[in-house]
Amino acid sequence: GTTPLEIVIPIEGTSQFYTVEARRFLGYDAPLPGEAVVIHLITPGTGVPAKVVDPDNNGNPNDAGAMWLPGETFQGVNGIRVQVNARTAEGWSVTVTMPLPDVQLSVAGAGSGNGMVTSSPGGIACTSTAGSSSGNCSAPFPGGTVVTLTPTVTAGSFVGWSGACVGSGNCQVALDQARSVTATFQLGNQTLAVTADGNGSGVVRSSLEGINCVSTAGTLSGACVAAYPQGTMVTLTAD
């Protein structure tokens, strides 16, 4: 209903759970020292009784130490928080905070250039070398975290993102689910130009498509200039 007198909070990764109960002067709660919120830790299947969450650690669920009152906050395992807000006509107003499970963020490199992608918060430090990724290219983050990815160029230029990011600046990824991002670093093109001298004739060709240059008595014709990605090995053959 909208005003439950007990809340069950599962503890992720275990069979345990907490119960948050509204204690009032009714039924078996009639002899209590006061009306309050009482929290128990339950371990099913062990035969162990429910354990009262008791700051004075005496295990008594019916004393003042086990009474959670407005303004008090219980901090449980795995980031679970129970905050007692106020007394209401029906019982108690409480706020329960349960962290989302971790979500995986993966980064890959692409392109002929070199660079690195780092994250804030930390966890990702992924190196891209001619499209091959190495280092910390995948990391878990708490669900709901907004992670900023920053590219740093070591050779060539940063072309941009694909996947969960777009554009060419820093990238922000909201981890509502597992996400993957690709960063592309590209080497720039360099110009290769053929010149000729002498009164003979011949043709210069490149091993990669681009150069097919005819020299006639020192006069050039055909494709005598071509652009290739930086670092490319091109072999020229003269006939």
Image (cartoon, helix red, strand yellow):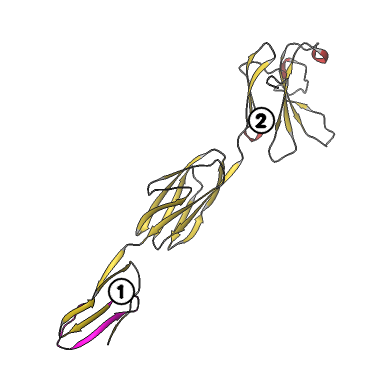
Q: Is residue 64 magenta?
A: no
Q: Secondary structure at mark 1?
A: loop
For disc 2, the marked residue is 76
Q: Quadrant of residue 225?
A: bottom left
| Residue 63 x/y as whole percent | 76, 16
The image position of residue 103, as x and y in percent, is 58, 44
Earlier in the chain: of badge 1 and badge 2, it is 2
Q: Amino acid at mark 2?
A: Gly
Q: Answer left or right for 118 relative to 213.
A: right
Q: Which residues are magenta?
A: 194-211
- The residue under the point 61% across, 40% down is 101
| Residue occupying image coordinates x 17% and y 89% | 200
Left or right of 219 on screen, residue 106: right
Residue beneath disc 1: 210
Q: Of helix, strand and loop, which mostly describes the magenta segment?
A: loop
> Viewer-proximal residue, 213 or 79?
213
Instruction: Please state the horizontal and vertical placement of residue 123, each as a whole percent of the image.
Output: 51, 47
For the residue carrying disc 1, how many other residues have a C-alpha within 10 Å: few (<14), some (14-19), or many (20+)? some
Q: Could you tell me the amino acid type at mark 1?
A: Gly
> Horizontally, is 183 left or right of 42 in the view?
left
